[in-house]
Image (spheres, grey):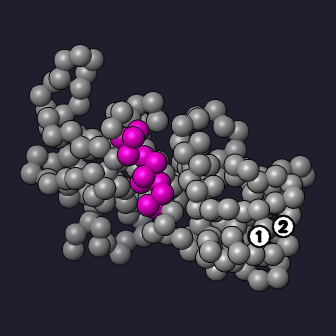
């Protein structure tokens, strides 16, 4: 069974953001080395620098396993990094990959709108999303009391003023990826439960 087909719930999958066949650049000189690259996990958008197996055939957008090491078959080693550590190619690809993950896992992200809770007396998880203020938040909460949302299309149709909820989510996820100093995180960087 390949790593992407594994049924193990503890396996963390990632999508390749950049592939460098001759290894990573160090300053102006390129050091010859094993194939390397960058990847982002699908479950919590954690960023990784990755050393690939010499024989692996990797393309941008390919799904690979980053954890646990015993489940890897294309990756020799990897470690978590921040957004600033990504190559310019990986940074460019990131927006497209985030959109793809949201589209592929629409049910998971619609569920956020159905289950989002208050953070404090003055702040709600929905208010973390760009463009969602008190009025729009209250409209979402009122509509979900009547009936849970079933899709992004359902959200748009039932909540006046909410346009392209997938794009709103993507903007928030990208903000969480780029800004390490954000006080509240809802999508990026949760610790895996098996650690």
Q: As rendered, which of 154 and 53 lies closer to the eye?
A: 154
Image-based side of 96 in relation to 107, left or right:
left
Q: Which residues are magenta?
A: 90-101
- The picture places residue 106, in percent across and down from the top left corner, at 54, 70
**Nearer-N-terminus badge (1/2):** 2
Residue at x 86% of width, y 55% of height: 134
Image-based side of 23 in relation to 109, left or right:
left
Q: Residues within 10 Å of mark 1 (few under 14, many from 20)?
A: some
Residue 96 within the magenta-colored segment of the rendering: yes
Does the rendering let one see residue 194?
A: no
State the separation of the CA atoms marked 1 and 2. Answer: 6 Å
Label drawn at residue 159: 1
Q: SS of the residue at dot 2?
A: helix
- The picture places residue 182, in percent across and down from the top left corner, at 66, 37
Q: As rendered, which of 10 and 166 lies closer to the eye?
A: 166
Q: Residue furthest top?
A: 28
Image-based side of 153 in relation to 138, left or right:
left
Label drawn at residue 131: none
Residue 83 within the magenta-colored segment of the rendering: no
Label drawn at residue 139: 2
Image-based side of 108 in relation to 126, left or right:
left
Residue at x 70% of width, y 44% of height: 184
Residue at x 58% of width, y 34% of height: 180
Q: As rendered, which of 82 and 59 lies closer to the eye?
A: 59
Relative to 56, is 28 above or below?
Answer: above
């Amino acid at each position: 069974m390949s790593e992407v087909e594994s049924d193990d719930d503890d396996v963390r999958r990632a999508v390749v953001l950049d592939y460098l066949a001759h290894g990573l650049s160090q300053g102006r000189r390129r050091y010859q080395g094993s194939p390397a690259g960058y990847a982002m996990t699908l479950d919590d958008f954690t960023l990784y620098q990755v050393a690939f197996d010499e024989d692996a055939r990797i393309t941008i957008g390919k799904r690979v396993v980053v954890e646990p090491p015993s489940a890897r078959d294309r990756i020799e080693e990897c470690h978590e990094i921040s957004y600033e550590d990504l190559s310019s190619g990986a940074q460019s690809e990131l927006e497209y990959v985030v959109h793809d993950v949201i589209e592929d896992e629409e049910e998971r992200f619609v569920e956020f709108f159905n289950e989002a809770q208050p953070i404090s007396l003055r702040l709600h998880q929905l208010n973390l999303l760009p463009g969602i203020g008190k009025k729009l938040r209250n409209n979402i909460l009122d509509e979900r009391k009547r009936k849970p949302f079933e899709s992004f299309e359902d959200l748009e149709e039932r909540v006046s003023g909410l346009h392209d909820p997938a794009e709103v989510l993507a903007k928030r996820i990208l903000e969480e990826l780029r800004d390490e100093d954000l006080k509240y995180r809802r999508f990026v960087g949760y610790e895996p439960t098996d650690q």
